[in-house]
Image (cartoon, rainbow, N blue to C red):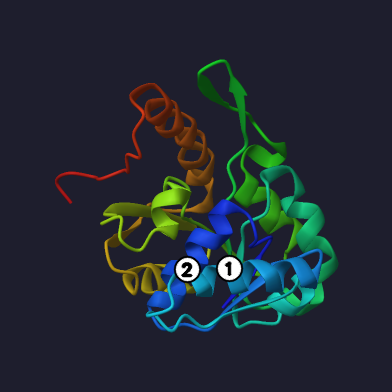
Amino acid sequence: MGILGGTGPAGRGLAVRLAQAGLQVTLGSRQAERAAAVAAEVVARWPDQGLAVAGADNEGAAGADLVVVATPWDSATSTVKPLRGILQGKVVISMGNALVKEGREMLALVPPRGSVAAAVQAALPASLVAAAFHHLPASEMEDLDSGLEADVLVCSDHPQATETTVTLIDMMPGLRPLNAGSLSQAAAIEAFTAVCITLNIRHRAHSTVRMAGI
């Protein structure tokens, strides 16, 4: 499992949960040394878990069978474009949200092609792109004692990518995957993250999305 741009809060949180589920995780970064240092910090925080997390440059992380793009939203396409050949034919999961902070609110931006996931798919025409992990609080993901419970919305134009992402999420305790349809749904899913973060700011909380009735 590879995570591009995995040294930020979102990437670290996802790495911890995936490693807890028994996967070998490679955190990617522009600088392999930084990725190795962050991976060591993650492992050291949970010494009893035996987490298999290592660091590499983004090219090294892209060599994994399944790859997540956890970079800031505005560098997602510039990160994946040079890795097109390595990522060809692979499932690539986009978790970026185009957001900007205004006062005590987060506002959603409209990125090129309508969503970060759609832009990643356009940059990787030979890859199977899915969108997922948008509404998860990074600090709660990284804290294995947080008792995190959340639904994770998944969308893609490729049934294989949807199935692979759903299976991956199902491996992580406390997370429930929900198939939300085609990649066109990514625009609304990504934008709703602004609402989630604004609620957390105003209520000083770490809320998650739960879909009742399903």
User: What residue type is disc 1 on?
Assistant: Glu
Nearer-the-camera pick, 117 or 57: 57
Quarter of the image for the N terminus: give it.
Answer: bottom right
Q: Residue furthest right?
A: 82
User: What residue type is disc 2 on?
Assistant: Arg
Question: Is residue 83 shown left or right of residue 193?
Answer: right
- Residue 30 higher or lower than 8, as above or below: below
Nearer-the-camera pick, 128 or 195: 195
Real-space CA distance between mark 1 and mark 2, rounded to the nearest whole angstrom: 6 Å
- Residue 103 higher or lower than 19, as above or below: above
Q: Position of residue 167 (x, y in %)?
A: 37, 74
Nearer-the-camera pick, 140 or 198: 140
Q: Residue at x 76, y 62 (%)?
A: 80
Residue, disc 2: 45
Q: Are marks 1 and 2 in contact (CB under 8 Å)?
A: yes
Residue 61 location, quadrant: bottom right
Q: Position of residue 101 (x, y in %)?
A: 60, 24
Q: Position of residue 111 (x, y in %)?
A: 68, 36
* Secondary element at tag 2: helix
Q: Residue furthest left?
A: 213
Question: Is residue 186 shown left or right of residue 4?
Answer: left
Residue, disc 1: 41
